[in-house]
Image: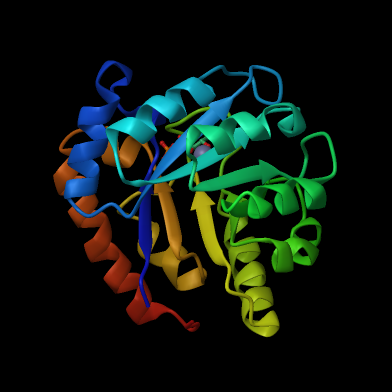
Amino acid sequence: MQIKLSPSILSADFANLARDIAVAVDAGAEYVHVDVMDGHFVPNLTIGAPVVKALRKATDAVLDVHLMISNPDQYLDDFIAAGADIITVHAESNGDTRAQLEKIRAAGVKASCTIKPGTPVTELIPLLPLCDMVLIMTVEPGFGGQGFIPECMDKIRAVRQAIQDGGYACELEIDGGAKLANVADIVAAGADVIVAGSAVFGGDIAGNVRAFHDKFADGVKMAQWSK
Ligand code: DX5
Ligand code: ZN
């Protein structure tokens, strides 16, 4: 059972993104998490499709693009054309989430849906057949460096159960507040893709990536689920 790390570049050096990504990937990071914020869906502004396009030229890494934007319908084509490998849309965003997921998949990109901490898993579970990955937000989206919301652990367990019950080939990612101290428990609860921003890019990037993988092994030993 492989657990993947998706370092969030929100906490990387924005003047040296290609360099920081290369260090993380060379140390074993499986994905690279790209947080797109529009200053409307969340109270913060980050980057758009042009940066994804530039990163696509700079790395072969799997670009895991998390859209925290009000109107995905307006921008999906741009992110697909930019070379995203995985695109995550929020169930709370405007538009028809099912149609958005279908459009992403039809373009040959992996489709993913996510819910904010206050949104129940019943919004996500019916979408599992349309998703290659689902993302449980474990902080309020908008900023790196926040604390993991403990109540989200039950949501991870519930979605893992639903994936197993339905036999879906769907990864379960979590995003926000993952640290070396809590990540084994998060994996044990059912997550198999871990986003970590501040805990990877704060300090020794390569050392942090390796330390996360060591903790993943601990979590797998504790896990009551398998795939
Ligand atoms: C929050 C972002 C996260 C964030 C994670 O809105 O979606 O990806 O960067 O950062 P940490 O790991 O520092 O909580
Ligand atoms: Zn994110």
Compare residues 97 and 139 and report the one nearer the observer: 97
Compare residues 61 and 167 and report the one nearer the observer: 61
Q: Total label count?
A: 0
Q: In the shown orientation, is residue 215 left or right of residue 90?
A: left
Q: How is the image coloured?
A: rainbow
Q: Residue at x 48, y 84 (%)?
A: 224
Q: Is residue 133 above or below residue 82?
A: below
Compare residues 175 and 151 and report the one nearer the observer: 175
Q: Is residue 116 visible?
A: no
Q: Residue at x 65, y 33 (%)?
A: 77
Q: In the shown orientation, is residue 208 left or right of residue 159?
A: left
The picture places residue 223, in percent across and down from the top left corner, at 43, 79
Q: Is residue 150 above or below residue 17?
A: below
Q: Residue at x 77, y 55 (%)?
A: 120
Quarter of the view holding residue 159: bottom right
Which quarter of the rendering shows the N terminus?
bottom left
Q: Is residue 131 visible?
A: yes
The picture places residue 140, in percent across and down from the top left corner, at 61, 36
The picture places residue 83, in percent across and down from the top left corner, at 47, 38
Q: In the shown orientation, is residue 10 left or right of residue 206?
A: right
Quarter of the view holding residue 127: bottom right
Q: In the shown orientation, is residue 172 left or right of residue 210?
A: right
Q: Residue at x 40, y 38 (%)?
A: 8
Q: Is residue 189 above or below residue 112?
A: below
